Image (spheres, rainbow, N blue to C red):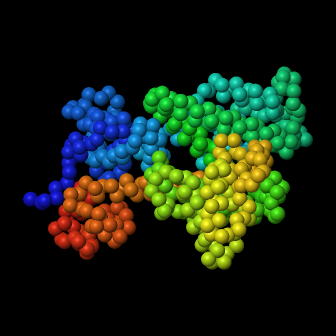
C-alpha cells in the first residue's frame, strides 16, 4: 500500500473551510467546467454532493454538471464582495461551459451598424458577429432603447431597420416617404457621401449613451453588493462585462480605420498644444498597476510610437520590493526600474510619461526619478473617473472635451496599459490555480515542488511528463515519481 494515497473528492470537500471564496469544478481531464462563489465554501460546495441530489434536480444542465465533477479547487478570500469580483474575473478567463455566458449578449439587445452598406442602418440584434459592423450595447431595457433609436432617427436623420430608401435616377437616395420627410425635418434626398456624417454623429451619440449606461450599471452593482444582494450584483456584473467587451471592440475598430495615419499626427499635435509640450509626443509610455485586494500585484508599461502601439517595447513587472497593497510604492518601484534601465543603456526617455491615476501616483513616479537623480520627461496622470489630466507642477487639473483627439490618444494608451496589466495578472493567477493541485499530493514540500516547476516550468508540462522524466528531478525516486504521475493523470 502506498504511503501517498490521493485525497478523495469527498475528503477534500469535508476539509473545506467555512469561509468565503471561489470554487472551480473540474472534470476527469482537469478542465474547469464551472466557477462559483460562496459565503461559505464548505456549505456551498458540499451541497453539490448531497446523497441523491443529482437525481432530484429538475434542471438537466445542473444534473449533468454534478455527474461530471471529479475534482474541485477553491480560493479563499476575505469577504463575499471580493468573491464576487474574483468569480467574475475567473469566468471571463476560463469561460467554463456550465457557467451562463453573459458575454454572448444573448439576453440583451445590441445595436448593429453595418458600415459596409452604402447607406448604413441602425438595427437591433442579440448576436454579435466578427464582421466590419459596429456594435453598441448590450442594453437591458429594450423599450428605452427603441425610444432612443426613434429619437436618434429624428435628431440625425438616420435609417433604422424598417426603412426602405429609394434610389433616384441620378444616383442619390430618397430616405423616407413624404410624410416622414416632414416629420424628421432633415434633408430627405442624400448621397452616400452626405449620409455618412449622419451615421458617424449617431454612432458617437450612441457610444456616449453606452458609456453613460456603463457608469450607471457600475454604481448600481456597487450599491447592491454593499446591501449584500450578491445574486443581483453578480447579474449586474455580468452585464457590465458584456458592455465593456462591446466598447473595447468599438475602440478596436476605430484603431483599424484607414484614416488613422493622418489623424494620429493631428491628434499628437493637438495633445502637444493642450499639454504645452515642447514637441509632439511621438513616443509615450504609460504605467498601470493591477491587483485583486493586494494579491498578485503586477504592473504594465505600454509604449506608443506616433500614436500607435509599439508592442515590441511593452514591459511587464512583478512587484519585488514589498508584499501587500500599496499602489504608490508599486508605481515608484516600476517607474524606477524602467528608467534606470534606459539610463544604464543610454537610451532616450519618451516624450511623455502617462500614469494611470491621480496626484498620488504621479508623486510616486516623481520620487523614482529623484532617487535616480534623473531629470524626468514631461509627466502627467490620467484619472479615470472624469478623464482628468493631472500635472506634477502647479498647473490646475485639465479636462479636455471627450471628443478631443489628444484625449482620445491618451485614452487608447491608458486602456492598452490597463488591458496588458490585467492580462498579466490573469496569467499569474491561472498559473497559481493550476499549480495548486500539487498542494493535495502528500509529502510534496516546497523544495521538491520548486524543483518540479524549475524542471517542467508549469503544471501542464508536468502533467504531460512521464514517470521516468519526473524521476530525473532531484529528490524523486521511481516510486514517488510513479505516484505523482498517477495522481496528476487519474484517468490513465
Quadrant (top left/top right/bottom left/bottom right) for the N terminus: bottom left
> In the displayed structure, does residue 110 sit left or right of residue 89?
right
Residue beneath the point at 28% across and 67% down? 447
Q: Which residue is the extreme one toward the left?
A: 1
Q: Position of residue 61 (x, y in %)?
A: 36, 35
Relative height, residue 68 to residue 454 (above, below):
above
Quadrant (top left/top right/bottom left/bottom right) for the C terminus: bottom left
Image quadrant where residue 409 sits? bottom right
> In the displayed structure, does residue 290 sit left or right of residue 368?
left
**Viewer-nearest residue: 347 or 371:** 371
Residue beneath the point at 58% across and 44% down? 245
**Viewer-nearest residue: 50 or 364:** 364
Relative height, residue 94 to residue 305 (above, below):
above
Tally of numbered tags = 0
Image quadrant where residue 482 sits? bottom left
Residue beneath the point at 13% across and 59% down? 3
Residue beneath the point at 74% across and 61% down? 378
> In the displayed structure, does residue 471 sit left or right of residue 78?
left
Q: Say if residue 403 shows up in the picture.
A: no
Q: Position of residue 332 (x, y in %)?
A: 58, 60
Q: Position of residue 279 (x, y in %)?
A: 81, 64
**Viewer-nearest residue: 238 or 451:** 451
Amino acid at each position: 500500500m502506498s504511503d501517498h494515497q490521493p485525497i478523495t473528492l469527498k475528503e477534500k470537500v469535508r476539509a473545506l473551510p467555512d469561509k468565503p471564496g471561489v470554487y472551480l469544478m473540474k472534470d476527469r481531464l482537469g478542465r474547469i467546467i464551472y466557477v462559483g462563489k460562496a459565503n461559505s465554501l464548505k456549505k456551498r460546495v458540499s451541497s453539490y454532493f448531497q446523497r441523491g441530489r443529482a437525481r432530484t434536480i429538475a434542471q438537466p444542465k445542473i444534473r449533468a454538471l454534478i455527474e461530471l465533477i471529479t475534482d474541485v479547487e477553491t480560493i479563499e478570500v476575505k469577504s463575499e464582495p471580493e468573491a464576487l469580483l474574483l468569480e467574475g474575473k475567473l469566468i471571463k478567463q476560463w469561460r467554463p461551459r456550465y457557467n451562463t455566458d453573459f458575454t454572448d449578449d444573448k439576453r440583451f439587445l445590441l445595436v448593429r451598424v453595418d458600415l459596409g452598406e452604402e447607406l448604413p442602418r441602425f438595427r437591433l440584434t442579440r448576436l454579435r458577429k466578427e464582421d466590419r459592423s459596429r456594435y453598441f450595447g448590450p442594453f437591458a431595457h429594450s423599450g428605452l432603447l427603441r425610444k432612443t433609436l426613434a429619437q436618434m432617427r429624428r435628431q440625425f436623420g438616420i435609417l433604422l431597420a424598417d426603412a426602405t430608401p429609394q434610389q433616384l435616377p441620378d444616383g442619390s437616395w430618397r430616405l423616407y416617404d413624404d410624410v416622414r420627410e416632414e416629420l424628421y425635418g432633415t434633408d430627405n434626398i442624400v448621397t452616400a457621401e452626405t449620409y455618412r456624417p449622419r451615421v458617424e454623429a449617431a454612432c458617437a451619440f450612441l457610444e456616449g449613451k453606452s458609456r453613460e449606461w456603463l457608469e450607471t450599471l457600475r454604481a448600481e452593482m456597487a450599491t447592491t453588493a454593499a446591501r449584500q444582494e450578491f445574486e443581483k450584483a453578480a447579474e449586474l456584473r455580468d452585464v457590465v462585462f458584456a458592455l465593456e467587451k462591446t466598447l473595447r471592440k468599438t475602440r478596436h475598430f476605430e484603431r483599424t480605420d484607414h484614416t488613422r495615419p493622418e489623424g494620429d499626427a493631428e491628434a499628437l499635435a493637438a495633445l502637444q498644444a493642450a499639454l504645452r509640450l515642447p514637441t509632439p509626443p511621438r513616443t509615450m509610455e504609460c504605467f498601470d498597476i493591477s491587483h485583486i485586494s493586494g494579491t498578485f500585484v503586477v504592473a504594465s508599461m505600454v509604449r506608443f510610437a506616433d500614436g500607435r502601439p509599439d508592442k515590441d517595447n511593452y514591459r511587464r513587472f512583478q512587484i519585488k520590493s514589498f508584499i501587500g497593497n500599496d499602489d504608490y510604492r508599486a508605481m515608484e518601484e516600476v517607474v524606477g526600474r524602467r528608467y534606470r534601465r534606459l539610463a544604464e543603456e543610454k537610451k532616450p526617455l519618451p516624450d511623455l510619461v502617462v500614469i494611470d491615476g491621480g496626484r498620488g501616483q504621479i508623486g510616486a513616479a516623481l520620487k523614482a526619478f529623484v532617487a535616480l537623480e534623473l531629470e524626468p520627461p514631461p509627466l502627467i496622470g490620467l484619472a479615470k473617473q472624469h478623464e482628468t489630466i493631472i500635472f506634477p507642477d502647479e498647473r490646475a487639473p485639465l479636462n479636455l472635451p471627450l471628443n478631443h483627439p489628444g484625449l482620445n490618444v491618451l485614452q487608447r494608451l491608458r486602456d492598452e496599459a490597463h488591458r496588458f496589466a490585467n492580462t498579466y495578472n490573469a496569467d499569474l493567477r491561472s498559473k497559481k490555480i493550476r499549480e495548486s493541485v500539487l498542494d493535495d499530493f502528500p509529502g510534496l514540500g516546497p523544495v521538491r515542488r520548486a524543483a518540479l516547476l524549475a524542471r517542467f516550468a508549469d503544471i501542464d508540462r508536468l502533467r504531460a511528463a512521464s514517470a521516468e522524466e519526473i524521476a530525473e528531478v532531484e529528490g524523486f525516486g521511481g516510486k514517488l515519481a510513479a505516484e505523482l504521475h498517477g495522481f496528476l493523470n487519474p484517468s490513465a
